[in-house]
Image (cartoon, grey):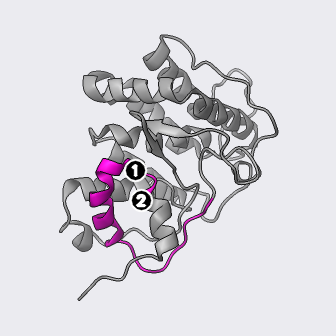
Amino acid sequence: MVPQLPTPVYAGLLLRSVPAPVRRDAHVALGMLAPWGHVTPQLVQDTGGGVADHDLHVDGRLVQLPYRLSHPWPSSARTARQNRRAQTVLAAWMTRSDRAGTRQRAVRELFASDEPWTAPFVVALCGEYVYEIGADVLGFVCGDLVRRDDLRAAYARFLRDNPSFLAVLRRRAVSFRDLDHRWPHRDEPGRIYPQLAALDALGMLAYGGPVPVPEIEGPAPRHALMSTNGAGPG
């Protein structure tokens, strides 16, 4: 039986989220997705009006990460038959899920990957509002990543190559620090939000100090300040 695939428009949005050399395996990952579901045309680097005012690159290759997708995670029986890179692509896409529990599961799987192109999917979660996921990223950056020289270097390159993206993420994290009513330390001014702590740790990794923040004009993007379906954990 020929597997049904997501519509060509959605497939294109997903394929553009990984560098060209990975897209053969991304086509395999597409075959694991249910034919129903949705992928937003908005990108994580959009800064207003659904328009990205800068590109996002991984080792010089353009990528475009969708802001959200609503596909369910395929069954383990289906994913187990595929190669490791295709499984990693699937996990990367699932970090953009509209369900926080799925995003957390996905990023924890990405932590085990040594693929350099996974960096933007992990880093992008620092600009979102589920503090448990931010804490996971912080733990990874300060722990496992430090001991993996090649992957640490890949993250450092990504951060240095995309300063405007990092500025957008920091601006979002600052907003969410006050909006995240689930974070138990929201009313404690001296407590740093996990996402901001993760960005600081990434800045130390890449620059030996905080991430430089270029000036970004305009208000924070509307879609970054609104809850999405399934925003809570689980």
- What kind of residue is marked 2? Leu
Depicted 182 relative to depicted 232: above or below = above
- Numbered badge on residue 101: none
Q: What residue is disc 1 on?
A: 18
Q: Tell me the residue at 79%/33% (across/down).
A: 217
- Density class for disc 1 (Cα within 10 Å; few <14, some 14-19, many ≥20) is many
CA separation in Å, label 2 and label 1: 6 Å
- What amino acid is labelled 1 in the image? Val
Residue range highlighted in magenta: 16-41
State the residue at coordinates (48%, 10%): 208
Give above or below for 231 relative to 61.
below
User: Can residue 16 be seen here?
Assistant: yes
Q: Is residue 162 left or right of residue 22?
A: right
Contact between labelled residues 1 and 2, with CB atoms less than 8 Å apart: yes
| Residue 26 position in % (x across, y down) | 33, 60
24 part of magenta stretch: yes
Does residue 148 appear in this view? no
Q: Nearer the viewer, residue 227 or 18?
A: 18
Per the image, the residue denoted by label 2 is 15
The percent coordinates of residue 48 (x first, y second) are 75, 47
